[in-house]
């Protein structure tokens, strides 16, 4: 009798939302969405940017109020809407992407400060705070020095602190918004272990991630949204990355190996024994006209540092670089740009583009000299040049004067590519060009890469996603610990073999 | 992949909007408010006398504000502007005194002015180099320069005035040309120069870019150090021009002249819609903001208000504009984010 009751209780969802609709300024962000989370399960919320994931989370946590007709059932209670206070009190916790922690304060203060708010007398009990923090970390099976300031810890451990804070708040369900976006592979594995611990202790986790491999690895079920509507709820077992992509975008991406023979073509870049103490060691490679050379490997393998050395922003300590037959040595990236090398930064938000400035200004930034007549800007030529690139790379924009931050990740990346193409490069280095770009828009980026290669541009593609390298490059180099350890030809080596080598 | 499509042309409305811009809203509103209120209160307000007074008083503050504007656009500040102007003025005074005093020739004066600009620019070079290479905060660097220049100037002048210049110097501060005050003409020339610099040259473009994000600009091939050094150099040179005008207006130079302008220049920049964190701002709105401040001061003078009250009202005006801008921004951007 009790057993049957227990089983019945376990099958009832912890959180259940029905007919959730939300409109912003005439745009339907959510259209009658249904969403359910079982107690203690790991549930992934998948969808492209703008599909309504964040809006849904904000409704559950009380930031937004859904339109009438919405039904929210949580832990046996029915609500027409949540408020941030009721949501927190009921054990709904969110770990936002920026974590919202205090770097200067200690781990204990970060974890337990909420428990001190509103207490009387209004004094801080450091002993109780340290105890609560240590207990929360213990539940996660982690030991951290709770007295050290948070800024001493790497981002992965700050995530743990944010999770511990949620536990102190008696969480029954924790939402994690892109928690692995800035983590390395080993840090990600560590975080996923923590998520499993959390779920095993009965806390439900809703996981939002762009990295589909993680989604498959960690979740029990997944809910897919597209354009604000529910596509479906699926058990993760039996899912594949390409099936999820298909559900998210509603399109089928037939991925074929683009690799072609390039042996006879003229060499654009030749690197011989390039080294920089502690960053990369004895790197040799050649890139030919119209060739796309991929460099893959885990984060921290020295890929970006190698690219920066080729781009003149990092001085190599040994080795030679030859560009179209002439040995080159750059004092700064201005020399590299003048010589015909362009580098698309992996960090689009803070290094690749100047977010508050306009689309037009970002686009012409690296090639401004070409717009000057007698030292003065020709406004008309600028407009023409910008309009031309916007059309050639099919960038979707409102007005040229709009801030670049108003564009989606994919369109921002197109502008960033246009910025470098406007310098008329011979070699284009693309460092992780699909970071923060929707699955659907990624294909578009690689279409551009392919057509640039067809026009004869030499391209180095740096990526930590092996399939990207495999499908889009003519040759794939595997970099680890600052060295090139393997060279693959996608036409003869299978994807699984390269993946096994890289992720080993 | 070349294109035969006609270049898109900005419509007249868009051009007008770009010319006026969102930065212009605050100063334009303040301008209309000041003109309307004072012409109602005092019938003499809308008279050539008022505008003459404004024309003679505006340039000192105005030139110093232009000197402040460029560093502010890079996200910095130049606190040494007033003392740079003083030291540059002293340079002119000493060269005149050493070469005939009241009898000094026009050539001597011209060379003295060049030397003053060189002195002003060199203070900027030093600050620019320190800021660009050590990444020290511009406030600290320019504060050090300000204290150094003040100490140096007071040591050399023993705290007194230096006066007695050839008679042809005075018209630069008091004369008129085609019915317009000479200092105003010089100021307007500098305003136009700065406008062209910021809207049409590579240095101006890069000033905005490094003001928004120095590292991203560097990754795009902007020589950020060179831009910083040039910005502070031009700022110093503009201080020198202000110093020469002040010399001509007061017919003397004293270290500490115009010291009270320092913070007003910062506020005039912000009143003119310049982003306090750098990256955005235009010269013409700043010019209008300066005119407003001067009109307010002259108008109060006209109705017989205390001079100190005028300064207090500047403060109130600036705060009001900031609040209004915030209100307008809230109304304009009220769109919940989606995603």
Image (cartoon, coloured by chain):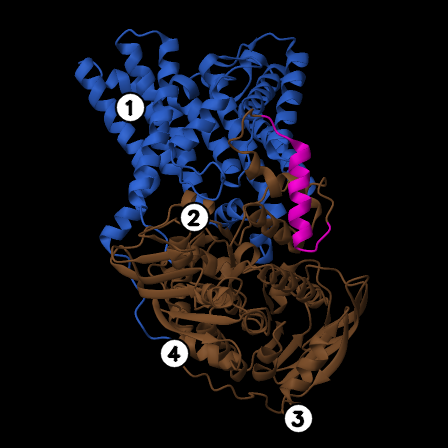
| Front disc: 2 or 4 | 2
Disc 1 target residue:
B179
Q: Position of residue A300 (x, y in %)?
A: 71, 64
Q: Are marks 2 and 3 in contact (CB under 8 Å)?
A: no
Alpha carbons under labels 3 and 1: distance apart: 85 Å
Main SS of the magenta segment? helix
Q: Position of residue B271 (x, y in %)?
A: 38, 30
A21 shown above or below B229: below
Q: Position of residue A354 (x, y in %)?
A: 50, 53
| Front disc: 2 or 3 | 2
Residue A317 — which label?
A: none
Alpha carbons under labels 2 and 4: distance apart: 33 Å
Location of residue A285 (image quadrant): bottom right
Q: Position of residue B240 (x, y in %)?
A: 54, 27
Local SS, label 2: helix
Do discs 1 and 4 share a chain? no
* Mark 2 nearby-residue class (10 Å; few <14, some 14–19, many ≥20): some
**Camera-side residue of A5 and A22:** A5
Q: Is residue B196 left or right of residue B34?
A: right
Disc 3 target residue:
A492
Do discs 2 and 3 share a chain? yes
Please state, as top left, top right, bottom left or bottom right, where the C terminus of chain B lies in the image.
bottom left
First in sequence: mark 3 vs mark 4? 4
Q: Are marks 1 and 2 in contact (CB under 8 Å)?
A: no
Local SS, label 1: loop
Disc 4 target residue:
A250
Residue extent of the magenta highlight: A123-143
Residue A87 — which label?
A: 2
Do discs 1 and 2 share a chain? no
* Mark 3 nearby-residue class (10 Å; few <14, some 14–19, many ≥20): few
Local SS, label 3: loop
Q: Is residue A259 left or right of residue A372?
A: right
């Amino acid at each position: 009798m009790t057993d049957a009751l227990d089983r019945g209780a376990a099958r009832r969802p912890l959180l259940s939302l029905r007919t959730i609709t939300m409109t912003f300024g005439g745009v339907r962000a959510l259209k009658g969405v249904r969403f359910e989370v079982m107690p203690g399960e790991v549930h992934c919320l998948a969808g492209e940017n703008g599909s309504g994931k964040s809006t849904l989370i904000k409704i559950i946590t009380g930031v937004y109020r859904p339109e009438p007709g919405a039904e929210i059932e949580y832990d046996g209670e029915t609500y027409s809407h949540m408020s941030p206070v009721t949501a927190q009190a009921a054990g709904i916790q969110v770990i936002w992407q920026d974590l919202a922690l205090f770097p200067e304060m200690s781990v204990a203060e970060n974890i337990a400060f909420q428990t001190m708010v509103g207490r009387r007398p209004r004094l801080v009990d450091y002993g109780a705070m340290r105890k609560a923090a240590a207990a929360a970390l213990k539940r996660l099976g982690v030991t951290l020095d709770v007295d050290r300031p948070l800024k001493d810890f790497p981002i992965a451990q700050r995530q743990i602190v944010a999770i511990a804070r949620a536990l102190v708040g008696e969480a029954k369900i924790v939402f994690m918004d892109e928690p692995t976006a800035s983590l390395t592979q080993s840090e990600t594995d560590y975080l996923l272990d923590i998520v499993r611990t959390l779920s095993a202790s009965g806390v439900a986790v809703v996981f939002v991630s762009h990295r589909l491999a993680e989604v498959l690895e960690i979740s029990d079920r997944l809910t897919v949204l597209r354009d604000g509507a529910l596509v479906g709820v699926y058990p993760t077992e039996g899912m594949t990355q390409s099936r999820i992509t298909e559900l998210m975008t509603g399109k089928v991406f037939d991925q074929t190996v683009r690799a072609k023979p390039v042996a006879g073509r003229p060499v654009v870049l030749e690197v011989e024994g390039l080294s920089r103490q502690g960053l990369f060691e004895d790197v040799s490679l050649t890139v030919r006209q119209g060739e796309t050379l991929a460099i893959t490997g885990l984060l921290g393998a020295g890929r970006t540092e190698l690219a920066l050395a080729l781009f003149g922003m990092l001085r190599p300590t040994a080795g030679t670089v030859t560009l179209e037959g002439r040995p080159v040595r750059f004092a700064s990236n201005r020399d590299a740009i003048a010589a015909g090398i362009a580098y698309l930064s992996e960090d689009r938000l803070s290094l690749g583009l100047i977010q508050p400035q306009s689309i037009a200004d970002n686009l012409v930034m690296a090639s401004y000299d070409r717009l000057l007549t007698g030292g003065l800007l020709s406004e008309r030529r600028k407009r023409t040049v910008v309009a031309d690139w916007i059309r050639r790379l099919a960038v979707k924009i409102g007005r040229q004067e709009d801030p670049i931050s108003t564009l989606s990740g994919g369109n921002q990346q197109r502008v960033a590519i246009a910025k470098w193409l406007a310098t008329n490069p011979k070699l284009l280095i693309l460092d992780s060009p699909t970071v923060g770009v929707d699955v659907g828009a990624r294909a578009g980026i690689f279409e551009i890469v392919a057509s640039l290669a067809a026009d004869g541009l030499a391209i180095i593609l740096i990526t930590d996603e092996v399939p990207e390298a495999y499908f889009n490059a003519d040759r794939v180099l595997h970099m680890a610990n600052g060295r090139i350890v393997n060279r693959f030809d996608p036409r003869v080596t299978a994807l699984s073999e390269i993946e096994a080598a890289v992720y080993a | 992949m070349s294109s035969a499509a006609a270049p898109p042309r900005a419509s007249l409305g868009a051009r007008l909007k770009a010319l006026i811009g969102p930065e212009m809203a605050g100063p334009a509103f303040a301008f209309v408010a000041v003109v309307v209120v004072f012409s109602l209160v005092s019938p003499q307000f809308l008279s050539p006398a008022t505008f003459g007074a404004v024309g003679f008083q505006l340039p000192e503050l105005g030139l110093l504000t232009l000197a402040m504007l460029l560093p502010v656009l890079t996200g910095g500040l130049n606190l040494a502007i007033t003392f740079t102007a003083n030291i540059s003025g002293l340079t002119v005074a000493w060269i005149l005194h050493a070469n005939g005093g009241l009898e000094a020739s026009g050539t001597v004066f011209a060379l003295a002015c060049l030397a003053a600009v060189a002195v002003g620019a060199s203070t900027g070079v030093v600050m620019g180099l320190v800021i660009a290479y050590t990444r020290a905060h511009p406030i600290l660097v320019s504060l050090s320069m300000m204290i150094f220049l003040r100490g140096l100037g007071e040591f050399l002048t023993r705290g007194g005035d230096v006066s007695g210049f050839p008679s042809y110097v005075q018209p630069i501060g008091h004369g008129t040309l085609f019915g317009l005050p000479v200092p105003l003409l010089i100021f307007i020339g500098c305003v136009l120069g700065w406008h062209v610099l910021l809207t049409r040259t590579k240095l101006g473009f890069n000033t905005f870019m490094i003001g928004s994000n120095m590292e991203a600009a560097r990754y795009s091939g902007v020589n950020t150090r060179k831009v910083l050094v040039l910005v502070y150099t031009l700022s110093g040179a503009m201080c020198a021009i202000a110093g020469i005008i002040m010399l001509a207006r007061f017919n003397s130079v004293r270290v500490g002249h115009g010291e009270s302008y320092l913070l007003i220049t910062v506020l005039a920049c912000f009143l003119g819609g310049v982003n306090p964190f750098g990256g955005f701002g235009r010269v013409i709105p700043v010019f209008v903001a300066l005119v407003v401040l001067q009109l307010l001061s002259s108008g109060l003078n006209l109705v017989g208000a205390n001079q100190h009250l005028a300064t207090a009202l500047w403060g109130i005006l600036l705060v009001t504009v900031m609040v209004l801008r915030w209100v307008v921004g809230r109304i304009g951007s009220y769109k919940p984010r989606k995603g």
